[in-house]
Structures are given as structure tokens and as C-alpha cells.
Amino acid sequence: MSTVLNRDWLLRGLFAALLLGAGAWLASSTEWVDVEVPTPPRGEAAKNRLYVTQQLLRRLGASVATPSGLTQMPPPHATLLLTSWYWDIFPERAQRLKAWVDEGGHLVIYAGDLSHAQLKSWLPIQRQEPPRKPASETKKKDDASDEDDEDPDSEDADTAPAPAASPASAVLARARFEPPCHEAVEPDSVPAAYPDGSRHFKICGYTAVGWKLQSATPALWALDGPAGPLMLRASRGQGQVTVILPWALLDNDSVLKADNGLAAVAALQARPGADIWFVTEEARPPFLGWLWHTAWVAVLLGGAALALALWRGARRFGPQAMAALPGRRSMAEQIIGTAQFLRRQGPEALLAAQIRALEAVARNHVRDYEKLGRSERAVAIAQATGLDAQALGLALDKSLARRRVDLPATLQLLETARRLLLQRDRTPRR
């Protein structure tokens, strides 16, 4: 019994020592640091990348408008931030925009839009790109870098062990993706944006290497960085044009960093009562919704007409009208109808109708009936019916003058020939 107890205590001791060793190793091999995790945007901020800037301007008392396109120009002396890619979908908009600026409007754009085909011809600010180096200098630089790589003195540096990476290196690596910050200052040649006299700013944002802004007219306001102006404003007619060089400076995740907010307010000239328009897209309502909103009466009438046409052209379950029951007219009805026909049309019309009835049946029994002459038709009908061909020829002659007493015999002959032709269809053939 004592041996079993000693074995249990030994196992428990070993398990406790193992846990203590694992805890000591975990404590010595890990490092706990606090990392700020940005809260993802929600609501309107998730859909509008300029939402923070717009809210900042509203807090300052400015009136902010966010139209879905540049269908109409802002009010005179207002500020227009134009970042839409498709604002020039209609060619006449560039002329309207130019006229609006000349009449006193304030246009704010990013430096990337200075090369726009419909803007660069009249904007007072131009973008100067860095000159391209000749291919020979580039080749020499590449050869020099290759020689440096083959230098034996650098072998020790290449083979030197890299410093051990600590768990906090992830935080340091994350800082590399943050936009760089630049010291900026307002030059003495322009008035200060704020009345306290402070002309120094710290601007955080990405800028293209070697890009510079230059104005053809004296600058009304500028914010110079280490390599040139980061923001520049110049006059155009009675209006003004402001260009922002750092990319996405007014976005939600950038405008509140360092002094970006102060620079954005100065660039937009935000003040209580100012009208500031943000045109960031060129959206249109869905076609079906727009059509219903503007022409719902025509849509309803067209739908009704289409439904009626489909109903009339659809397959029916029965005839359109009840079929008439087959039957023969009585002799009295036949005599009355014939008498009325004779009274209204005359005997010549009755003869012509009888001839047409005979010919309609003869076409189905005599080959090439239309190509035959009157006498040939009479012979062919006589051969088919056994009647007198000469009498049939006289009966088929419409131009022959007949007496009223001869008309019944002629009608009887034509009707007999027609019925004999019809009887041939009912005669069974071997």
C-alpha cells in the first residue's frame, strides 16, 4: 500500500515540475506589448472616405454639400473639392467649370489631376515631374552596385549574423506602413492661414518623389515642404485654384494625423457660413427606377398595350365565335334570294356569278385552266362532264347578248356542269 502511495506522489511531483518548467520557459521566451488596433469604420464612414473631413467642416460652421455628380456648378464664390474620376463624362463640363472659376469659384484638386487633358490648358498651377536620367547613367549606376556587391571587404558585413528579432518587431514593422511626416511652413510672401501667427505645420502623407508644384502667377497661399510646395493656391480670373500634393490627405484615416486637419481647413478655406461642395463620384440612379419616376404614365400605358397584344396573340382554348351549324336553305329561301339578287344586280350579274362559280370548280379539275381560251375551256369541261361543248362555249361567253327567256337554260347548263365536276370528287377511284 505504501509503495502505491509513493508512486502517486512521485507522478504528481513530476507533473507539477513539468508545469512550472513550461511556465518559466513561456515567461522568458515571450514579450507582452500593447498594440493599438484601429477600429474599422462603420456606418457612413465605411462608405464615404471623406466623412471625417466633412464632419470637421460642419463642426466649424461650414455648409457641406455632397452631390452625386457635377451636373450643376456650385454657387458663386463657393469651394469645390473635385476628386471624381468621371466628372468630364460630358465635354461641356470643362468649359462650365472654367467659367465658374473665372467668375469667383474656388477649385481644390489633388496634384495627380493637374495632367488632366481638359484642365492643364487653363489651370494656373502646373506639376513639374523629375527629369529622367539618361540610360548611360543608369547603366553606370547598376555596374557600380554590382561591383559593390562583389567587394571582398563587404564579405564580413554579408556574413554577419542578423540581429535577433524580438516580438515587438511586428509593431515596428507596422510603423513602416504609416505615411511619412514632413515639416512644412508657410512662406513669408503669403498671408498666414491662422491669426495666431504660427506658420509651421507637420504634414503626414505620401508624395511622389521629385514632384514639384509651380504657379504661373504669384501664389496666394502656399505650404512648403522639404522638397517644395505641399499645397499651393493661385488666382484664376476672379476665382482661385488650390492644389494638394500629398495623396489622400483628406481621407478618414489621414486627416486627423499631426497637423493634417489644420492644413485641410486652410486649403479648403473653411469658415462659418462657407459653402463647400465635395464631388467624389458620378453616380446615376438605376435606369428602371429613373424611367418609372419620370415617365410612369407612359410605362403603364405601354405595359397595358403589351399585355393586350399578348392576350390577342395567345393560343385560345376554343374558337373566337360559335361555328354555324351546317344546313341547306329551303327552296323558298333560294327563290327569294335569287329574286332579290336579280332585282338589285340584274340578270347579267347573275350570269357572271354563275360563270365564276363554274370556273372556280373547273380550275381544280382541268389542267392549266387559266392558260386555255374560252372554247378550249368549254371542250375540257365537256370532256369531264359529258355535256355539249358548243353549248358550254356559248354559255361561258359573257359578251353574248341574251334574251331573258334564254337565261334560265344557260344558268341551268352552267350549274349542271359545276355539279358534275363536283361529283367527280365524290366518285370512288380504284
Image (tube, rainbow, N blue to C red):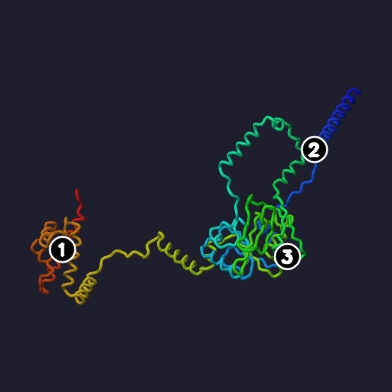
- Residues marked 3 and 1 touching at CB (< 8 Å): no
Which is more foreground, mark 3 or mark 2? 3
First in residue order: circle 1 vs circle 2: 2
Q: Quadrant where the N terminus lies?
A: top right
Mark 1 or 2, closer to the camera: 2
Q: Position of residue 107 (x, y in %)?
A: 62, 64
Dot 3 or dot 1: first in sequence order is: 3
* Amino acid on which the number 2 mark rests in the picture: Thr
Q: Which residue is mark 3?
A: 59
Query: What is the residue that sits farthest to the left in this orientation?
Result: 390
Identify the residue at image location x=74%, y=44%.
Answer: 172
Q: Which residue is mark 2?
A: 30
Question: Please, what is the three-letter code of the amino acid marked with disc 3?
Answer: Arg
User: Which residue is at 80% across, 38% downward?
Assistant: 30
Q: In the drawing, does residue 174 fall left or right of residue 121?
A: right
The residue labelled by disc 1 is: 416
Q: Are marks 1 and 2 in contact (CB under 8 Å)?
A: no
The CA span between labels 3 and 1 is 108 Å
Residue 86 pos. (x, y %): 56, 59
Are the two marked residues, 3 and 2, in contact with CB atoms closer than 8 angstroms? no
Give the Cα distance between marks 3 and 2.
Answer: 46 Å
The answer to whether residue 398 shows anywhere in this view is yes
Tell me: residue 429, above or below residue 76: above
Element at label 1: helix
* Residue furthest out toward the right: 2
Asked if residue 55 shows in the view, the reply is no
> Toward the viewer: 46 or 228?
228
Amino acid type of the residue tagged 1 in the rendering: Thr
How many neighbours does mark 1 have within 10 angstroms: few (below 14), some (14-19), or many (20 or more)?
A: some
- Residue 135 lies left or right of residue 353; in this view the side is right
Q: CA distance from mark 1 to mark 2?
A: 123 Å
In-front residue for pair 378/293: 293
